[in-house]
Amino acid sequence: MANIKTVAELAGVSPSTVSRVINATGYVNEATRARVLSAVERTNYRPNALAKSLKEGHSSTLCLTVPSIQNLIFAEITRGAEDVARENGFTLVLCNVDDNEEVEREYIELMKTQWADGFILCSRTGTGGHIRALRDGGFPLVLALRFNEEDVGQFDIVSVDNFRSVYDATAYLLRSGYRRIALANGQRELFLYRERLRGYRQALQDNGVPFDSALVLSQQGGLDSFVPQVRRVMALPEPPDVIFADSDPKAFVVLHALHELGLRIPEDVALLGYDNVELSALVQPPLSEVSQPLYEIGAAAARAVIRQIRYKEEHGVLPPPVSLVLDVELVIRRSTR
Amino acid sequence: MANIKTVAELAGVSPSTVSRVINATGYVNEATRARVLSAVERTNYRPNALAKSLKEGHSSTLCLTVPSIQNLIFAEITRGAEDVARENGFTLVLCNVDDNEEVEREYIELMKTQWADGFILCSRTGTGGHIRALRDGGFPLVLALRFNEEDVGQFDIVSVDNFRSVYDATAYLLRSGYRRIALANGQRELFLYRERLRGYRQALQDNGVPFDSALVLSQQGGLDSFVPQVRRVMALPEPPDVIFADSDPKAFVVLHALHELGLRIPEDVALLGYDNVELSALVQPPLSEVSQPLYEIGAAAARAVIRQIRYKEEHGVLPPPVSLVLDVELVIRRSTR
DNA sequence: CTGAAAGCGCTAACAG
DNA sequence: CTGTTAGCGCTTTCAG
């Protein structure tokens, strides 16, 4: 591919002049400008972004880490992030890290050397000293969806109110007359699932319903682990009248397990999901959901890093961290009554 | 971040020596080697990949274009591609192009200037002169899943035998006693769906079953367009006894539409899907599927570009194109009998 | 308004 | 075994 020098020679000017017309920086005589443009045209010249990046000290690249893109939740977030990245002239590098902090660390290390301009991390897990170090190193970063308690005020965060949303949904279930509410709860290592559990317990307590630990199913390893637990809980002398799955992937396996048991939904037992991914409206019965704005979380996260990048360009330092808490909405379909 | 020069000074050697120890290229005295390593340690030095790329003329970056990552099919492929990219030291840039050839073109143009080392395109649509130009420009590229008839022999291609797989599945349905087989067929602009349709027709013909155009539902715009068509076809005097959806996203909406109609599956009408994404085993009833190795398609595509990249490094030109046709498998679950 | 020159950080001959 | 030099392609003072 042609470079700036060949274009310059063809146009009979210096490389700096070509640079000026390409980037519309500085005055340039209309006639020479035309000559340059024509030379660009003829050589089909495209500036080398690598060289430009090296010179300017940034790469217009964002790094997004997710547990796995195969999970619909993260696919949705990724799409949101990619859309706003592109609108702003950034390119998105996708990193699947599988809940593996080591892989996450390596990826971040790699992307630092590639001069990623910023990071969107949806894979927060463990203690994450490397994430601290990343920000301390002056790298713009935002935590989306997953974050720890102690992260608040330390990093930019985009999420929903996990406690509140589950509290409200549980209260709604109670108001609807459900009394034996089971919770299919995600990995306890993640703050967000601890919060969801806390919201559930608090709502029970505030409504005078005793907490029954036999009614909480918790993830051990893969999602499959919910199948035997659903069987167990439905075999209880007093089985639940509704199961609240605190994420849609879980909701789908719970739904499946319930069907295998030959149970009717919501007649025999109701089901409430969390996330509201598109498919939740398509399964049988269509699921009632706590609807989390996943696409918007991704989009907002991208906006947040870009804000940091621009701020840093201007002021030389990262702006103070901000947290963005997006609203959640209850959508009632046919899996609850 | 520290650069090679500061490390060199700290170690009391020249930058080239640092480069030599970092890259394990050329002999270096054990003692000075140790000094350099220590300096690297102390400065927490990481080589600047951008500079390295500029110098070496490649970026260790692969560009993957997909219609949308929100589609489970492409999420699966993406994961496969990313895994092998990473194993080989490549980084994956994700480009959602939404069946929009213009966006695809722009993305490719952008990634060329970023010196992407290779392209995996799952978004092939239209005439794609820009794709020809890309390969003519010496860029390694592979078409995965989606390709046109005339692409064979021109580009590396990774896919399945669309004609054969649908032919076989249709023949299976016939052998199972189904006689009125409806086909929910994808966008006719895509070669792969034309091939699937052809496989269906051929199987019918070879088995002496007349083709009935009233039995083919075809995508007009979004997937929603199948809902009224399912209604229409089930209201026929002689409704189908099975619907074959030639991709899983379609299968899910057809399944939904059937449920809304109050039909039992497979008693009233059976359903066969295509793709075998994970969720297809979880819906009610679990779907019988033509199982396409999506993850493997992505992985194989990544291997294919990397092969081209290496070949080009060695020989200066792209290797002759090869097509890889992966096997498909019929998985019978409970949506057919 | 335009060109010369320096330099982003790195690697690779080429000497020594 | 190690340093010097040149240069990847671009931008950006600084002169003119």
Image: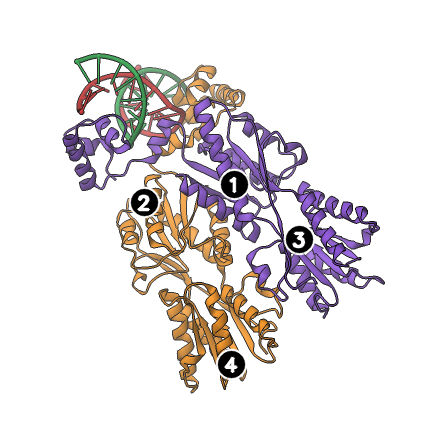
Chain colours: A orange, B purple, C green, D red
Q: Which amino acid does label 3 sit on?
A: Gly
Q: Distance between the residues labelled 4 and 3?
A: 42 Å
Same chain for mark 3 and mark 2? The answer is: no
Mark 4 and mark 2 in contact? Answer it, CB < 8 Å.
no
Position of the C terminus of chain B by quadrant: bottom right
Number of the front mark, 2 or 1: 1
- The answer to whether the residues at label 4 and label 3 have Cβ atoms under 8 Å apart is no
Mark 3 or mark 1, whichever is nearer to me: 1
Chain on which label 3 sits? B
Query: Which residue is identified by label 1?
Result: B300
Q: Which mark is residue A286?
A: none
Residue at disc 3, secondary structure: loop
Residue identifier under label 2: A109
Is disc 3 in contact with disc 1, using a CB cutoff of under 8 Å? no
Nearer the camera: disc 3 or disc 2 = 2
Q: Name the residue under label 3.
A: B222
Mark 4, residue position: A235
Instruction: State the SS at label 2.
Output: helix
Q: Mark 4 against mark 3, which lies toward the viewer?
A: 4
Nearer-the-camera pick, B26 or B129: B26
Camera-near label (4 vs 2) is 4
Comes first in the chain, label 3 or label 1: 3
State the image coordinates of residue B268 (x, y, percent, origin top left): 75, 67
Residue appearing at x 56%, y 77% in the figure: A270
- State how far apart marks 1 and 4 are (Cα): 46 Å
Measure the C-alpha gap from mark 2 to mark 1. 27 Å
> Which amino acid type corresponds to the residue marked 2 in the rendered image?
Glu
